[in-house]
Amino acid sequence: MKQWYESLFENYAKKYDKECYVQGTIGECDFIELEINRDKSLKIIDIGCGTGRHAIELTKRGYNVIGVDLSENQIKGAREKAREAGLTIDFQTQDARNLPFDGEFDLAIMLCEGGFSLMETDKMNFEILKNAAKALKSKGKLIFTALNGLFPLFHSVKEFYESSTKEGNSACKDCSFDLMTFRDHNTVSFEDDSGNKKELKCNERYYVPSEITWLLNSLKFTKIDIFGAKLGAFSRNDKLTTEDFEMLVVAEK
């Protein structure tokens, strides 16, 4: 049986690119460049790359990037966009829980919940972090975003989704946040690229900073910084607060 995230992205590449939460690519890539001191000799892997927006933008800026995603449809969309931009990028259909890379990359990015926190068990989410860590060289860096577990303690996830949904985008309803598991169970309604209206039962894991720190420490990351993640405006100046829906994590081995 397919999981909700597999069904969602079966035929959703073009509509996905119009979602409001994927419009921050330029500013997010600016932050990535600062974090690697604009060193174009570095090898980068974009895990859960979707339709390749970060990989394409970084390649345009002269970086060597590989993009991987579980969804063949998303990878197909990424390849089409790269071709239209006149770029040659290695986009691969891969499961982030079982990547074939070992010590090959200087930087791994997983942005906009590109796999991590979407899995149905905490163990599977940890496998994604483990595989990202394994793909990195001994002094590698990992930059990713995760849903901020502090947010639902002070705010309604349902109200957040309602306030941020735009016409034509997917919409979440029937949100139910479980304090025991820190998972939000909801129903997402959307229209796929063929115009079919669909509804899926979803659940996503929210993490608190201490959990993220513990998980990364167990994977031999020695320097871990966590910030608030502002769409298209990632910055080390944004201290994580209960107002942030997402957290930005920068970890170094």
Image (cartoon, rainbow, N blue to C red):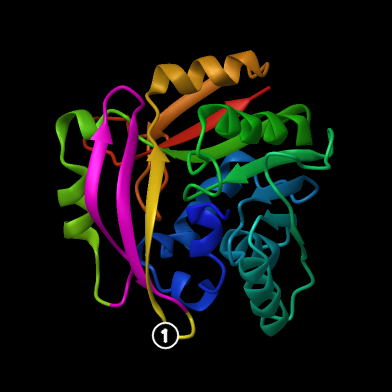
Which residue occupies the foreground of this view, 66 or 199?
199
Relative image position of residue 56 (x, y in whole percent): 64, 66
Three-letter code, disc 1: Gly
- The reply, left or right, for residue 241 in relation to residue 163 is right
Q: Which of the image's four quarters has the C terminus? A: top right
Q: Is residue 64 visible?
A: no
Say few, some or many: other residues with alpha carbon within 10 Å of mark 1 (under 14 / 14 to 19 / 20 or more).
few
Q: Quadrant of residue 161?
A: bottom left
Q: Is residue 233 above or below residue 89?
A: above
| 179 part of magenta stretch | yes
Relative image position of residue 181 (x, y in whole percent): 36, 26
Q: Which residue is mark 1?
A: 195
Q: Is residue 185 above or below residue 121?
A: below
Relative image position of residue 72 (x, y in whole percent): 68, 66
| Magenta span: chief secondary structure | strand
- Could you say whether the residue bearing mark 1 is in a helix, strand or loop? loop
**Residue at image point 68% right, 28% down:** 130
Q: Is residue 140 above or below residue 52?
A: above
Which residue occupies the foreground of this view, 57 or 104?
104
| 41 part of magenta stretch | no
Q: Is residue 101 visible?
A: yes
Q: Is residue 114 above or below residue 179?
A: below
- The reply, left or right, for residue 109 in relation to residue 140 is left
- Count how many numbered circles sit on residues in the image: 1
Relative image position of residue 68 (x, y in whole percent): 70, 55
Query: Which residue of the protein is positioned furthest toward the front in this rendering?
Result: 1
Instruction: Please provide the residue range marked out in magenta.
Output: 168-192
